[in-house]
Image (cartoon, rainbow, N blue to C red):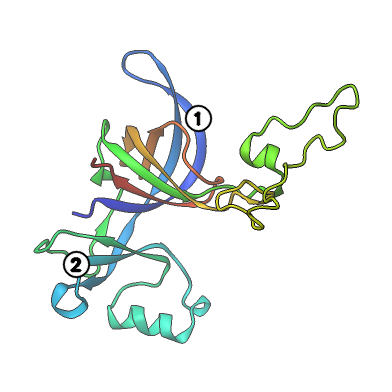
């Protein structure tokens, strides 16, 4: 059975656990996912499976995509991802798996694309405190200091500069699955996960 699944972030809420404690959770529609292709060491040099998530109408696909799904005799899917599997593990193309591959109490790592913040200055991007704002001490309250110098004559690697913020792949590790709703195929995971509501996420079992 695969140890990872694709899902869609639905939003956050809070629930009461069995001990009566209120717990903030993120709700994820996890799967169903289908094995669309097998990767083997003999043919591809590594062991993995390609999984598909969310049905898509065939007219939205280009010809190579249509041929790929037809060759493996699976319904067209909107999103494809590869996940590694152990050598010798047997899975069949067309095999479907859902949120029930996880159980309450499991530790997971969730990967998603963080919210884009656009162009941001150093105070917003890095949390810098800025320059003094009183008694005419400075006319540059939010600007970064000089990043180079007459000796170096170049900008040092790692220097904080204004620029594009967010819209990056983030992995949140060690999150706990609080509840698995097998009837509605939902995962309730404690805490926040990367990305906006409706965003694609990958959930995998966390093994350190």
Residue drawn at the location 28% of the way across and 60% of the way down: 83
Single out the residue that lies furthest toward the left: 88
Disc 2 crowd rating (10 Å Cα; few below 14, some 14-19, many 20+) is some
SS at badge 2? loop
Disc 1 crowd rating (10 Å Cα; few below 14, some 14-19, many 20+) is few
> Residue 166, position in %: x, y?
59, 49
Q: CA distance from mark 2 to mark 1?
A: 38 Å
Circle nearer the viewer, 2 or 1: 2
**Residue marked by disc 1:** 13
Q: Image check: 169 left or right of 84?
A: right
Residue 137 placement: quadrant: top right
Q: Nearer the viewer, residue 58 or 206?
A: 206
**Residue marked by disc 2:** 47
Q: Quadrant of the C terminus?
A: top left
Residue 43 placement: quadrant: bottom left
Single out the residue that lies furthest toward the front: 151
SS at badge 1? strand
> Residue 178, position in %: x, y?
34, 30
Residue drawn at the location 32% of the way across and 13% of the way down: 19
Q: Which mark is residue 198?
A: none
> Residue 155, position in %: x, y?
63, 54
Residue drawn at the location 27% of the way across and 78% of the way down: 72
Does residue 65 sit above or below 3 in this rendering?
below
């Amino acid at each position: 059975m695969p140890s990872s699944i694709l899902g869609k972030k639905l939003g956050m809420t809070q629930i009461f656990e069995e001990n009566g404690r209120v717990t903030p959770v993120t709700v994820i529609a996890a799967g169903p996912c289908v094995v669309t292709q097998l990767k083997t060491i003999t043919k591809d040099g590594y062991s993995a499976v390609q999984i598909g998530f969310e049905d898509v109408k065939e007219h939205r696909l280009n010809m190579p995509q249509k041929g790929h799904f037809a060759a493996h005799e699976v319904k067209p899917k909107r999103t494809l991802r590869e996940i590694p599997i152990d050598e010798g593990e047997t899975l069949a193309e067309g095999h479907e798996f859902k949120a029930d591959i996880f159980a309450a109490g499991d530790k997971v790592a969730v990967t998603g694309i963080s919210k884009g913040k656009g162009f941001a200055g150093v105070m917003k991007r890095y949390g810098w405190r800025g320059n003094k704002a009183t008694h005419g001490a400075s006319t540059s309250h939010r600007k970064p200091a000089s990043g180079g110098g007459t000796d170096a004559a170049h900008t040092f690697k790692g220097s904080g500069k204004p620029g594009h913020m967010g819209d990056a792949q983030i992995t949140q590790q060690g999150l706990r699955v609080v509840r698995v709703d097998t009837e509605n195929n939902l995962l309730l995971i404690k805490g926040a996960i990367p990305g906006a509501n409706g965003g694609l996420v990958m959930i995998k079992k966390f093994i350190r």
